[in-house]
């Protein structure tokens, strides 16, 4: 944790911390996206290689509904995660407001 000192060469203004944090954020996001692109490429290669294999039709079972597609399941799961993250964000900001109220000047 940076603390202010009397030597101006050793102080770290809040703007520099903010700029450093933003740069780290951008680098992390860039690395994450590069990793995603590598895994997409690998998945495309795998899908192309196994696409020549025969896929048997599974029998329909009376009374059992069809399973949702992977896309529908993924979308639903991310929607739930986004709702939970928003609820957690709202809760955290409200809690911060209670514990550290704005100072009047």
Image: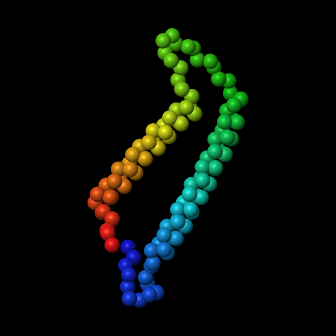
Q: Residue furthest bottom?
A: 7
Q: Residue furthest top?
A: 62
- Residue 25: percent from left, percent from top: 52, 62
Front-most of residues 38 and 7: 7
Q: How is the image coloured?
A: rainbow
- Residue 96: percent from left, percent from top: 33, 58
Depicted 16 relative to depicted 67: above or below: below
- Residue 56: percent from left, percent from top: 63, 19
Depicted 14 relative to depicted 49: above or below: below
Depicted 70 relative to depicted 19: above or below: above
Q: Quadrant of residue 44?
A: top right
Q: Residue furthest front?
A: 105
Residue 78 placement, left or right of 96: right
Q: What residue do we see at 54% from left, 60% from top?
A: 28
Front-most of residues 11 and 105: 105
Residue 2 placement, left or right of 58: left
Q: Quadrant of residue 104?
A: bottom left
Q: What residue do we see at 45% from left, 78% from top?
A: 13
- Residue 26: percent from left, percent from top: 56, 62
Give the quadrant of the N terminus.
Answer: bottom left
Give the quadrant of the C terminus.
Answer: bottom left
Q: What residue do we see at 66% from left, 36% from top?
A: 47
């Amino acid at each position: 944790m940076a603390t202010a000192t009397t030597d101006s060469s050793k102080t770290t203004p809040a703007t520099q911390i903010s700029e450093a944090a933003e740069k780290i954020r951008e680098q992390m996001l860039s690395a994450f996206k590069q990793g995603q692109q590598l895994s997409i490429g690998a998945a495309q290669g795998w899908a192309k290689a196994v696409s020549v294999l025969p896929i048997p039709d599974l029998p329909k079972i009376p009374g059992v509904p069809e399973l949702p597609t992977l896309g529908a399941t993924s979308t639903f799961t991310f929607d739930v995660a986004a709702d939970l993250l928003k609820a957690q964000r709202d809760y955290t900001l409200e809690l911060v407001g209670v514990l550290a109220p704005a100072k009047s000047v």
